Image (tube, rainbow, N blue to C red):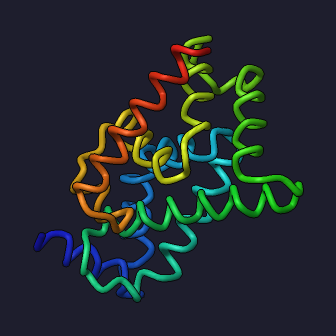
């Protein structure tokens, strides 16, 4: 924890900020990309949201109060940026978030960065049928193998509620895949 406080001080100090931020980007770029990609589904969109996330982190690091881990704070920003991106894109197209997710899944087959097969596509369709919160919880637990405690900090929800959401999501996905 002491190391994190020192690192945050370096991120805030104008003399050490650029070097510390390079280190932060190096450390978080790949895991954040996959976190964002799990939410927005499209590679190019994920890159855009990732860039916006780092801009927000850089612009707001002085507001970080240390009430959570830096990791959780950054992931919360990435999650919010991803959800905002989906909302704005859906509004621009005059459709619901769910319809946008379905369109994104349909485009996955032609996405050269998508490494899945037919089963993965079915799973993505099943996930898209879930409510937004269950989608997030499922993706964070299933794809990122994130601990409930970390999810709790990122999503600002109790561990018990997250476990229940994950359980309900799994049941709904199983049901969806059985009926597909």
The percent coordinates of residue 116 (x first, y second) are 57, 18
Q: Is residue 74 left or right of residue 59?
A: left
Placement of the C terminus among the 4 image quadrants = top right
Which one is in front, 55 or 45?
A: 45
Residue at the extreme left of the image, as rendered: 2
Screen quadrant of the N terminus: bottom left
Task: Give the mark count.
Answer: 0
Residue 122 coordinates in the image, percent (x, y): 60, 19
- Residue 140 found in image quarter: top left
Q: Residue at x 45, y 73 (%)?
A: 18
The one of 94 and 113 positioned closer to us in this rendering? 94
Seen at 71% across and 52% down, the residue is 97
Q: Quadrant of residue 154?
A: bottom left
> Which residue corresponds to the image point at 77% horizontal and 22% vertical from the top-left?
110
Q: Is residue 42 above or below residue 11?
A: above
Residues 99 and 179: in front is 179
The correct choice, above or below, for 44 with respect to 162 in the image is above
Identity of the residue drawn at 36% across and 53% down: 27
Q: Position of residue 15 (x, y in %)?
A: 38, 85
Direction from residue 21 to residue 179 in the image, left or right:
right
Front position in the image: 106 or 52? 106
Image spot of residue 151 (x, y percent): 31, 55
């Amino acid at each position: 924890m002491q190391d994190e406080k020192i690192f945050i001080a370096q991120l805030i100090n104008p003399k050490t900020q650029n070097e510390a931020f390079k280190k932060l980007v190096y450390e978080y770029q790949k895991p954040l990309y996959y976190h964002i990609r799990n939410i927005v589904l499209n590679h190019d969109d994920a890159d855009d949201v990732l860039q916006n996330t780092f801009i927000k982190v850089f612009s707001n690091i002085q507001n970080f109060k240390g009430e959570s881990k830096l990791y959780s704070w950054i992931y919360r920003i990435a999650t919010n940026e991803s959800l905002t991106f989906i909302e704005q894109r859906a509004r621009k197209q005059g459709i619901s978030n769910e319809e946008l997710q379905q369109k994104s899944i349909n485009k996955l087959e032609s996405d050269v960065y998508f490494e899945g097969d037919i089963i993965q596509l079915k799973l993505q369709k099943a996930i898209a049928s879930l409510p937004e919160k269950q989608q997030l919880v499922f993706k964070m637990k299933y794809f990122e193998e994130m601990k409930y405690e970390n999810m709790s900090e990122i999503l600002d929800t109790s561990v018990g509620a997250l476990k229940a959401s994950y359980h309900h999501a799994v049941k709904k996905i199983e049901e969806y895949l059985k009926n597909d």
